[in-house]
Amino acid sequence: MRNLAILGSTGSIGRQALEVVSEHADLFDIYALTANNRVDLLIEQAHHYMPEVVVIANEQKYPEVKEALEDLPIKVWAGAEAIAQVVQMEPVDMVLTAMVGYAGLKPTISAIKAGKAVALANKETLVVAGELITSLSREYNVPILPIDSEPSAIFQCLSGAWQNPVEKIILTASGGPFRAMKREDLATVTKEQALKHPNWEMGAKVTIDSASMMNKGFEMIEAKWLFNLAPEQIQVLVHPQSIIHSMVQFEDGAIIAQMGLPDMKLPIAYALSYPKRLANKSERLDFNRYASLTFEQPDTQRFRNLTFAFEAVHKGGNMPCVLNAANEVAVAAFLHDEISFLQMSDLIERTMAKATFIANPTYNDYVETDREAREISAKLIRD
């Protein structure tokens, strides 16, 4: 029985992780659940899974959670610091980080320092501080198991073949809802259009990142750190059917691909149970329904965020942290109708140009960089 702490249990990944747990109740037990704002769902999950601890990040909502669970033997905590503390508790075996954005960095560091295995759905942690996270992972001998579909696919392709040098990896991208749209039409797309992903069901922030191709830029940075690759060894390829989730090309030219229907429960289960695979009853891939699988190069003139991601990782230091902070502000502004779809990229570019560059950042530098970049982006929106 593996005790899990699920950070972000009310989000898309968190909810699907709990479905996996329910399907394999003989293998997993929920020790802790955390959420940011979705009180009603967190309370419902607590009643169902009876964790030892629940944490609501928004401290203003603590009384509501506390009152709803006061008749149950469940500890109720609140605040970001409490999330960083709960992952360190002795009974926890694995921490699934499904929090969105920069907020996942501190608890992930706490989990690693406590020697807990990390199932990572929060790609921003490696985008912001990949060098620090991978260094700590080696120091504390803690595995980082990717949950995002594409990094998980790479991980699966490499399983059993770690000793073979990789020539390159190929990250596939659906292209999002605007893959075939002209640039002039992108200027007027709405958030409702951007939130309609053709293949995947995801949270709002990740869905917008997918529509702008920033999600693929983040996955490229994540893959660099997870698999110890140079950016030049990572190719992004648009694959509209989302059947091939990613590929690895070895030095002899052989390419191995991980394939399947779009289903996040598979990579979640693989991370939770690695190295074993768990049986599931999800729909199987029928090649008779997919007679043609197509590929195309991403258009970085229309989707500039992918270029910014490569620029940030090439410059190194704290620049990916700047990239992430600016993107979080840009996405929030777009979702609140403050800027247009194309203006998100403009905002990110201008923030990267204005932010202070630090070649060898410490954790405190990342914290300050995140603050400064958000301040710069917010000011640019106001001006």
Image (cartoon, grey):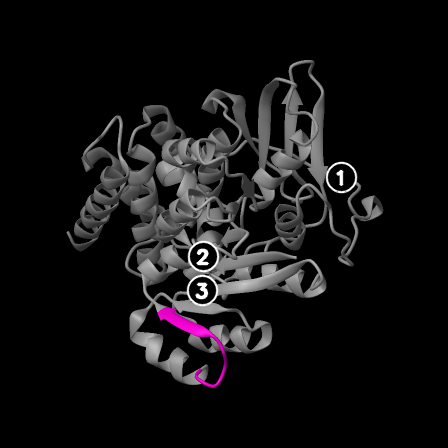
Indicate the position of residue 61 as horizontal and vertical percent values.
34, 76
Residue at the far front: name it. Answer: 90
Indicate the position of residue 162 as horizontal and vertical percent values.
64, 25
Q: Is residue 75 magenta?
A: yes
Instruction: Give the class, few, some or many, for how many residues have Cα within 10 Å of label 3's Cα (few <14, many ≥20).
Output: many
Amino acid type shown at disc 1 = Ser
Indicate the position of residue 134 as horizontal and vertical percent values.
44, 33
The residue under label 2 is: 89
Amino acid type shown at disc 2 = Met
Where disc 2 sits, the SS reads: loop
Q: Nearer the viewer, mark 2 or mark 1?
A: 2
Specify start and end residues of the magenta stretch as a single range: 70-77
Of labels 2 and 1, earlier in sequence is 2
Asked if residue 64 is positioned above or below residue 130 in the image, the reply reads below
Residue 196 seen in the current view: no
Asked if residue 374 is positioned above or below residue 55 in the image, the reply reads above
Where disc 3 sits, the SS reads: strand
Asked if residue 58 is positioned above or below residue 277 in the image, the reply reads below
Amino acid type shown at disc 3 = Thr
Q: Residue at x 61, y 17 (%)?
A: 165
Q: Label 1 vs label 3: CA separation? A: 42 Å
Q: Is residue 149 left or right of residue 160?
A: left
Q: Residue at x 36, y 37 (%)?
A: 129
- The quadrant in which the N terminus is found is bottom right
The residue under label 3 is: 34
